[in-house]
Amino acid sequence: MGVLSVEEAFPKEVAVMAYSGYRANERPLYFILNGSKIVVEAIADRWYGEDHDYFKILGDDGKIYVLRWDRIFDIWHLVKIMERQGRH
C-alpha cells in the first residue's frame, strides 16, 4: 500500500493538498499515492529552483518523500521515495 511498483517511473504526478498562506502551495499537507492518503508529519527540508519548489517530507507511513511543485503549470510530482534510516 502506497509503494510504487518497479514498472512505475519517477517523477510521478500526484494529487497534493497544500496549505496556502501568504502564497500559493506554501507547504504540502497530504498527497494521494496509488489510492492511499499519505499525511505529511514533518517537512525535513525544502529548496527552491527556478520554476519548481521541492519538499523533502516525512509521511505518516514512516517513509521519506521528495515532492516537486511546478509553479508554472501548478502540477505536483513525486520525485523520490526513501526508507527512513534508524527506525525501529
Image (cartoon, rainbow, N blue to C red):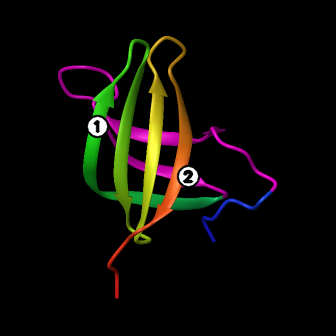
**Amino acid on which disc 1 is placed:** Arg
Residue 46's tag is: 1
State the residue at coordinates (34%, 28%): 25
The residue closer to the viewer here, 17 or 12, is 12
Please tell me whether residue 27 is drawn above or below residue 3 in the rendered image.
above
Tell me the crowding category of disc 2: few under 14, some 14 to 19, or many 20 or more residues within 10 angstroms, Cα based: some
Residue 41 percent across, percent down from the top left: 29, 61
Which image quarter holds the C terminus? bottom left
- Disc 1: CA contacts within 10 A as few (<14), some (14-19) or many (>=20): some
The verdict on residue 87 being magenta is: no
Residue type at tag 2:
Ile
- Left/right placement of residue 72 relative to residue 33 reads left
Q: CA distance from mark 1 to mark 2?
A: 20 Å
Q: Earlier in the sequence, mark 1 or mark 2?
A: 2
Q: Is 55 drawn above or below residue 51 in the view shown?
A: below
Residue at image x 27%, y 30%?
26
Answer with the quarter of the image where residue 39 lies: bottom left
**Residue at 55 percent of width and 52 percent of height:** 32
Judged from the image, the secondary structure of the residue bearing numbered disc 1 is strand
* Residues drawn in magenta: 7-34
Quarter of the figure with the N terminus: bottom right
* Tally of numbered tags: 2
